[in-house]
Image (tube, rainbow, N blue to C red):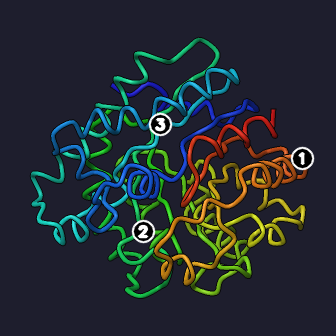
Amino acid sequence: MYKYRDSIPINSTGLFLTDGGLETTLVFHHHLDLPEFAAFTLLDQANGIETLRNYYLPYIRTAREQGAGFILESPTWRASRAWARKIGYDVDQLESVNASAISMLADLRREFEMPGAPMVISGCIGPYGDGYQVSEKLTVSEAEEYHREQIDILSRTEADLVSAFTINYNEEAEGIVLATKASNMPVVISFTTETDGRLPSGKTLKDAVQELDDHTGAYPVYYMINCAHPVHFNGALKSGEPWVRRIRAIRANASEKSHEELDASTELDEGNSQALGQWYRALKDRLPDLSVFGGCCGTDVSHIREIARAIH
């Protein structure tokens, strides 16, 4: 069913784009109510799939204009048991929405993929607790057990890999890797950082990547940084040491604000899209192994266009 699971083309030197801040776009630009920031709830609403499809289309067109590959990231960041229970979803409904999300993306791939510009389907998962702070810490085995349910569902779809977003401590990251390994799914681990370039747990990016690779036999396909502005983590990537080459993707926030400031904000901070593009260009110039570029909170297709122009 899947297309690239056995050979993820992202490991080539080509350019891949992906989308921006899905949830912030839907809430602030489309004025939609997303309980618990859960975009997957749209899959059960009238015209919800059409809304999501229309969200992805401008990003896909941008990638085609650039001749770039594209990562179709599913709207399932909150589609795991603990979060779903808070908004009234049971286990059967959870399986249905995860499967529906990937099916929607597979339809988009069949319609828009072009030779030389692959479209990779990623099953997005999120943390058990708050992505901004280590509030409910799981052990490795607890994290493996918790995330295995959603990962097993995704493994039975056309998803090529799993991407774990906004991970802020290593025990959960390791549990996720073990669960994906048991399901024979490739995995991307995306860490978030505070303004000092460290994970919310206090661990450095270097230690987080090296420790996880040591504990899992370097199983993750690559690492990503998301939900932080480049001004926050730029300094952590200057070493030129081998671990930095494991970071292949950036999905930055538009805003330079801290997580605490963003949490308290009632308005969307869209930052400066041209300046963000130049940040990405500087990162790409210094780190040639970077190949996947998208956005997170506050970014939309205008930011991704600027990033693509700056890089290309």
> Along the polypeptide, which appears first: circle 1 or circle 3?
3
- 1 and 2 marks in contact (CB < 8 Å): no
- Residue drawn at point x = 88 percent, y = 66 percent: 238
Which amino acid type corresponds to the residue marked 2 in the rendered image?
Answer: Gly
- Which quarter of the image is occupied by the N terminus? top left
Q: Quadrant of the C terminus?
A: top right
Give the vertical position of 152 relative to 106 (above or below). below
User: Of label 2 and label 3, which has the lower sequence position?
Assistant: 3
In the rendering, at what x and y percent does residue 136 appear? Answer: 37, 86
Label 1 vs 2, first from the N-terminus: 2
The x and y percentages for residue 215 are 57, 69
Q: Is residue 138 above or below residue 146?
A: below
Regarding mark 2 in the picture, which secondary structure is present there?
helix
> Residues at badges 2 and 3 in contact (C-beta under 8 Å)?
no
**Viewer-closest of 261 and 243:** 261
Whether pointer 1 and pointer 3 mark residues with C-beta atoms closer than 8 Å, the reply is no
Instruction: Estimate the x, y position of residue 212 in percent, counting from the top left.
Output: 59, 68
Residue bearing the label numbered 1: 285
State the image coordinates of residue 233 (x, y, percent, origin top left): 75, 70
Q: Amino acid at mark 3?
A: Leu
Quarter occupied by residue 102: top left
Q: Which sits in the foreground, 53 or 188? A: 53
Query: Is 278 left, or right, of 113 in this rendering?
Result: right
Taking the spot 84% from the left edge, 44% from the top edge, the residue there is 288
Task: Write down the residue under mark 2.
Answer: 175
Pick the front one: 55 or 189: 55
Residue placed most toward the observer, 188 or 141: 188
Q: Which residue is mark 3?
A: 72
Which residue in the rendered view is the most extreme toward the top?
A: 115
Residue occupying image coordinates x 73% and y 41%: 306
